[in-house]
Amino acid sequence: MRISAEARERFAVSPELLWPLVADTERLNRALRLPPVAFAAVFVGGRSALQGEMRLGRITLARWIEHPFDWEAPHHYLVRREYSSGPFHELVGGVELTAIEDGCEVRAWVDLEPRNLVGTLLGREIIAPRSTRAVLAQCRLFERFLRGEAPSPFPQLRPQEPVDAKRLAALARAMRNGGAGERSRPRPTTAIAPADRARPRGERDPAVRASGSLAGRAA
C-alpha cells in the first residue's frame, strides 16, 4: 500500500524569484537537517547508474538507485528513488510552483512504497507529512528573504567565514621566502558537486561527470 502526502501554500513572490531557492536542493536538504548522502557510480543489470546511500555514523539507513531529476524551471521538479535496502521500495516526490495573481502557490508532495511495517509507520506518521510541511516552512523563509525582510534564505546554515586577507598575504610571503614565516597545516579539500541539485532531464550529474560516464542511466 503506497503512502502519499501533499501540502500547499501561497506566497507573495513570483515563481521566477522563488525557483532558484526551491531548486537548490543541496542547501535545502541541509537546512531541513536531512542526513548526508553519498553517491557512487555503479552497474545494475549491465547498465551504469547512480547509487545513493544514507548513513548515520557506521549504520547504513538506506541505499537506492537515484534516477535523473526531471524538472522545468520555474515550474516543477521531481525525483525518483528505487531502494535496494531500508524501509522503502520506492520514493517519488517533488515541488510544483504555480503562478497566481499575487505571487505563486507551492505544492510539495511525496509518494512512498513501504517495504515493511516499519516503512509503513515511518512513512505515514513521519516522513510523508513532515517532509512536505518542512518544504513549505522553508519557503516562508525564502519569501521573507526575497521581500527584504531577512538577511538569508537559509538561516539554519552556518555562514561562510570571511577570508582573512592579511593572513593569506603572510602565507604567500612565507612561500616566496622558502617557507619562512607563518605556516599553516594544509587542509584536505574535495570538490564534490551537489548530486541532489535539480537538473534538466537528460543532463548528467556533475559529480558523475567527474568520476566517469553514466551513459545509459535509467530514465
Image (cartoon, helix red, strand yellow):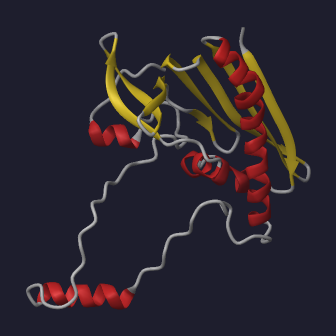
Above or below 156: residue 96: above
Q: Where is residue 52 in the image (x, y as percent from the top left)?
A: 44, 30
Above or below 34: residue 120: above
Circle count = 0
Query: What's the residue at 62%, 11% (across, down)?
Result: 116
Point out the residue furthest to the left here.
178
- Choose top left, top right, bottom left or bottom right for residue 123: top right
The answer to whether residue 14 shows anywhere in this view is no
Above or below 172: residue 143: above
Nearer the observer, 2 or 101: 2
Query: What's the residue at 69%, 24% (across, down)?
Result: 122
Locate the N terminus by quadrant.
top right
119 with respect to 142 (left or right): left
27 with respect to 63 (left or right): right
181 with respect to 4 (left or right): left
Q: Where is residue 167 in the image (x, y as percent from the top left)?
A: 33, 87
The answer to whether residue 77 shows anywhere in this view is yes
Q: Position of residue 104 (x, y in %)?
A: 83, 47
Nearer the observer, 182 or 79: 182
Query: What's the residue at 87%, 47% (across, down)?
Result: 10
